[in-house]
Image (cartoon, coloured by chain):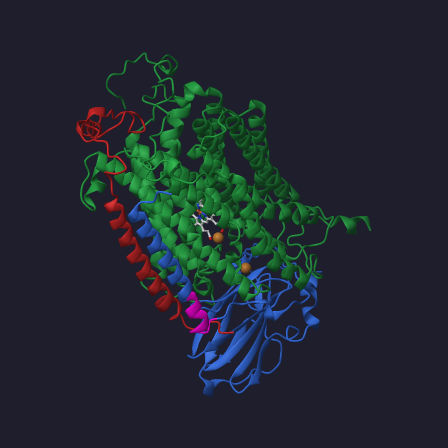
């Protein structure tokens, strides 16, 4: 691929001088390096995770069985952890580091501190990764086949739990880094509104600090001492509840960097301006307040929790739809603004005036469209009693491959096409391949996810290597189970090809010797700017306090009654598999 | 705060949607009588199920004219009993608990579905109106043999139904799987 | 230069300097017609979202009353 007006001798180095002074790479070469290294980890995890994904899609449909069924769950654990935790959160850290620096217009306070959290997160990931991979080698007595939703009595090797704890501490340090950066800015700008991207970073991190308390208590207080054999097995229902205290808000932790891209980058790419800065702030505040006091909606079908608590979680969850529905309006209106500035007309005709040839635009637009569909299946999941229909069936992975698997992952890929040139100074290797790749992801996901949703309605469970049981005949509403299997596997293969194309395109961009052009880092101002909103929106302490109060209200009674019921360490609970012989017995 | 009129309209529509969803669910609970599994089942010691009334001899018990109780023990990787027979037009209360790890209990193709957590008893009452054969699957990952954990539920024409006598029904599930893990349930302890 | 790029560069309605991620599409800033807050009503957005609203309402009704309540045995106690 060559572009006109480019001489052969033009190298990235000589071209750097040609980049505009306000391009991110020129202003913050060191931060760019941090972002590059975070993205590298994210993309490696994405590649391995996608490979596991296609193995699963082929295996559980019986189309190609490369691995043993008993090993399926090791692959599934790797898939869940690498994609839903490592890929998403490393990419988030990269985007947030970029966005906070760009919008505050100053680098993080200390380079060493920044590298310290990068290393901490990576070390934690490596430990958990070793534990999971060792599960494939029977000769090593280490395994972590507990899936990315880990609760007692299924047990992983302690190094898995310790690795996760180290990883989470790394994310906390990252949050502290971004807050320090903000406070340094605040000292110089005491009366200004918080720049929007930074506002998004900070509210998301407050939510994360609150949310991770649940998993921190689960892992540090219960799972690590138990897996080391120091303490007895904890109350399984308690560990589930602590996990889901964190397990729902993590969903918004995945989503917020995608929202950040949709609110701030997408309008620019579409040639428009953000429709409403005030509502963007309201949306992030609502997520901070409502993300955590809803986790019990993952336990609608758990015994030992009174129906009233489930009902409260359900109403909170339904109101949590509000910020996403508002986002739909603001983001689409910002894109429409671009289309109209570019001559688009009519009620629907403006859609033609959008830059559909741009993979960054098309990727994010298709991600948003899938999110609209995923939003619907999420509404069904959230609907308490209708959860009987879909709980733990294939419907559920069908749902979240639309949300985290596409709304988030595809936005990240599209965002990478836009960001990677900005943090490397190198020209995107191929725009047409990028465009093809994002469309392919969309098509693949239509197949895989639709088949999963329908399979779920037929009662096919999720997380199983052999969804054929001698005792069970699954009946679909329309079409045969066999054709659903084919569609699922076909979609999975398309997705895998798309993932490979993405990694290749980004990898070749990172090595591209052609310089990127036009990397102005400014984002257009919002149509309705922050001055049109009350300053109380920027009062982060107030929102943090209300969020904590809501969490206490939502969780204290359920936790109290769970502990009242079976206690912290109920009699008769036993680890499976018992990885380490209980220390106390060894001593005795 | 400045909000465009169209966006106010959308805000109203969104709230309407949310209230609509909540109302449907309330209708399902109050009108259609759907109850969530809750804390009524109480707690048990998973290692003492053999001495716990009901779970010491899992299976079907008749408790009223058209009322039955079914006690089911879930374990790696089977349900006890492996076959449940019931008459149609009956009201059945399932008491399900686990001897080892967390399992799931789903009567495929129906809304009878619950988590099974060691130490807790899942109590769900279901009405079976029509005869039919159903599969029961474990839908919560429970270890390397999870995919072989299933059982049968046969709802018979009332005229064809006779209570099984009280002998222990054999364990279900494909005990000979390619799974490598062995049960770590009660006996091995 | 590929055909799509040639077409794209002939596209006169584009605005901004670095609209395509790889910078291949250079837009002419003169063509930008700037729409201010007062001049712009997102009627297309409203139309799209009202369609979405209808789809949600219909699909919800279908899922709840047909798929769910029509799905045989249900937990009633
Ligand atoms: C190549 C693309 C992908 C393919 C083919 C794929 C395929 C699958 C399949 C078939 C399952 C279901 C396994 C089962 O329940 O038995 C699954 C589960 C899952 N996938 Fe993906 N997936 C892909 C990409 C992604 C992405 C991008 C994400 C998130 C960022 C993701 C997150 C998950 C999660 C969290 C699970 C659940 C794991 C669990 O049940 O513990 N997947 N995937
Ligand atoms: Cu959730
Ligand atoms: Cu299972």
Q: How many marks?
A: 0
Q: Which chain is represented by red in the image? A: C
Q: Please tell me which residue is depicted at 46% across the width and 44% down the height of the picture.
A: A285
Q: Which is more toward the observer, A67 or B12?
A: B12
Q: Name the one closer to the observer, B181 or A266.
A: A266
**Relative vertical location of residue A233 with respect to residue B99 in this rendering, above or below:** above
* Chain A pictured colour: green
Residue B42: x and y, percent?
63, 69
Chain B drawn colour: blue
Q: Which residues are magenta?
A: B25-34
SS majority, magenta: helix
Instruction: Inspect this view and state whether residue A274 appears.
Output: yes
Res. A156 in view: no
Instruction: Measuring from the top left, give residue A546's x and y in whole percent.
Output: 54, 48
The reply to whether the magenta stretch includes residue B27 is yes
Q: Residue A523 lies in magenta, yes or no?
A: no
Q: Residue at x 24, y 40 (%)?
A: C40
**Near-viewer residue (A159 or B115):** B115
Horizontal side of A422 relative to B187 (left or right) equals left
The residue lying toward the viewer, choosing from B165 and A416, is A416
Q: Is residue B116 above or below residue A537?
A: below
Quadrant housing the N terminus of chain A: top left
Question: Does A329 appear above or below C77?
Answer: above
Which image quadrant is residue A533 in? top left
Q: Give x and y (percent) for residue A214.
A: 59, 48
| Left or right side of B185 for A204 | left
Q: What x and y, as percent, mark residue C63?
A: 36, 63
């Amino acid at each position: 691929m060559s572009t006109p007006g480019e001489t052969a001798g033009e190298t990235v180095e000589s071209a750097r001088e040609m980049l505009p002074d306000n391009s991110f790479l020129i202003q913050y070469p060191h931060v760019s390096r941090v972002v590059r290294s975070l993205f590298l980890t994210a993309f490696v995890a994405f590649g391995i995770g996608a490979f596991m994904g296609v193995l699963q899609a082929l295996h559980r449909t019986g189309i190609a069985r490369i691995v043993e069924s008993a090993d399926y769950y090791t692959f599934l654990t790797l898939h869940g952890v690498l994609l839903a935790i490592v890929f998403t959160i490393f990419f988030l850290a990269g985007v947030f580091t970029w966005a906070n620096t760009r919008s505050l217009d100053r680098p993080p306070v200390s380079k060493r501190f920044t590298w310290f959290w990068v290393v901490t997160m990576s070390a934690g990931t490596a430990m958990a990764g070793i534990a999971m991979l060792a599960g494939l080698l029977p000769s090593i007595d280490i395994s972590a086949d507990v899936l990315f939703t880990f609760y007692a009595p299924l047990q992983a090797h302690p190094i898995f739990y310790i690795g996760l704890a180290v990883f989470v501490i790394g994310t906390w340090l990252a949050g502290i880094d971004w807050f320090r950066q903000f406070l340094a800015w605040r000292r110089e700008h005491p009366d200004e509104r918080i720049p929007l991207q930074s506002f998004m970073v900070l509210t998301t991190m407050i939510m994360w600090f609150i949310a991770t308390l649940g998993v921190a208590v689960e892992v540090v207080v219960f799972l690590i001492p138990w897996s080391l054999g120091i303490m007895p097995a904890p109350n399984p229902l308690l560990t589930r509840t602590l996990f889901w205290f964190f397990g729902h808000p993590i969903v918004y932790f995945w989503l917020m960097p995608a929202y950040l891209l949709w609110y701030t980058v997408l309008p620019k790419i579409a040639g428009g301006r953000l429709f409403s800065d005030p509502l963007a702030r309201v949306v992030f505040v609502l997520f901070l307040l409502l993300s955590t006091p809803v986790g019990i909606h993952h336990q609608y079908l758990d015994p030992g929790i009174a129906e009233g608590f489930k009902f409260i979680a359900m109403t909170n969850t339904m109101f949590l739809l509000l910020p996403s529905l508002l986002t739909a309006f603001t983001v689409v209106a910002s894109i429409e603004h671009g289309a109209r500035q570019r001559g688009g007309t009519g009620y629907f005709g403006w859609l033609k005036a959008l830059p559909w040839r741009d993979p960054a635009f098309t990727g994010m637009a298709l991600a948003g469209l899938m999110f609209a569909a995923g939003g619907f299946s999420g509404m069904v999941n959230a609907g308490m009693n209708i959860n009987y229909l879909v709980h733990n069936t294939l419907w559920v992975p069908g749902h979240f491959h639309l949300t985290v698997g596409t709304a988030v992952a595809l936005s990240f890929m599209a965002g990478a096409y836009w960001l990677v040139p900005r943090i490397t100074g190198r020209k995107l290797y191929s725009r047409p391949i990028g465009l093809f790749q994002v469309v392919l992801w969309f098509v693949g996901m239509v197949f895989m996810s639709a088949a999963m949703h329908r399979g779920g309605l037929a009662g096919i469970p999720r997380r199983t290597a052999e969804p054929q049981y001698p005792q069970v005949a699954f009946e679909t509403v329309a079409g045969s189970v066999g054709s659903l299997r084919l569609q699922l596997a076909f979609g999975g293969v398309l997705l895998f090809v798309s993932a490979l194309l993405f990694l290749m395109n980004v990898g070749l961009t990172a090595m591209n010797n052609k310089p990127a052009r036009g990397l102005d880092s400014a984002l257009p101002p919002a149509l309705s700017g922050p001055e049109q909103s009350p300053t109380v929106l920027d009062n982060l302490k107030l929102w943090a306090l209300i969020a904590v109060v809501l969490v206490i209200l939502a969780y204290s009674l359920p936790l109290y009654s769970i502990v009242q019921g079976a206690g912290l360490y109920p009699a008769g609970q036993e680890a499976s598999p018992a990885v380490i012989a209980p220390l106390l017995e060894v001593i005795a | 705060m400045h909000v465009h009129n169209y966006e106010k309209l959308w805000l109203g529509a969104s709230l309407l949607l949310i209230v609509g969803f909540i109302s449907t669910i309330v209708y399902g609970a109050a009108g259609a009588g759907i109850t969530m599994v809750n804390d009524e089942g109480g707690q048990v010691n998973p290692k003492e199920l053999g001495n716990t009334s009901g779970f010491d001899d899992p299976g079907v018990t008749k408790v009223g004219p058209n009322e039955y109780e079914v006690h089911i023990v879930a374990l790696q990787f089977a349900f006890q009993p492996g076959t449940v027979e019931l008459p149609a037009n009956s009201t059945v209360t399932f008491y399900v608990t686990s001897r080892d790890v967390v399992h799931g209990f789903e009567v495929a193709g129906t809304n009878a579905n619950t988590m099974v957590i060691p130490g807790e008893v899942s109590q769900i009452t279901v009405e079976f109106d029509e005869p039919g054969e159903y599969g029961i699957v474990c839908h919560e990952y429970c270890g390397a043999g999870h995919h072989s954990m299933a059982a049968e539920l046969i709802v018979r024409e009332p005229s064809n139904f006779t209570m099984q006598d009280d002998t222990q029904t054999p364990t279900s599930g494909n005990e000979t799987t390619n799974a490598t893990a062995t049960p770590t349930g009660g006996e091995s302890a | 230069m590929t055909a799509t790029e040639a077409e794209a560069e002939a596209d006169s309605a584009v605005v901004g300097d670095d609209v395509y991620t790889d910078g291949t599409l250079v837009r002419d800033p003169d063509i930008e017609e700037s729409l201010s807050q007062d001049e712009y009503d997102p009627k297309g957005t409203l139309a799209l979202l009202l369609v979405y609203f209808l789809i949600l309402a219909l699909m919800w009704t279908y899922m709840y009353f047909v798929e769910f309540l029509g799905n045989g045995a249900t937990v009633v106690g």
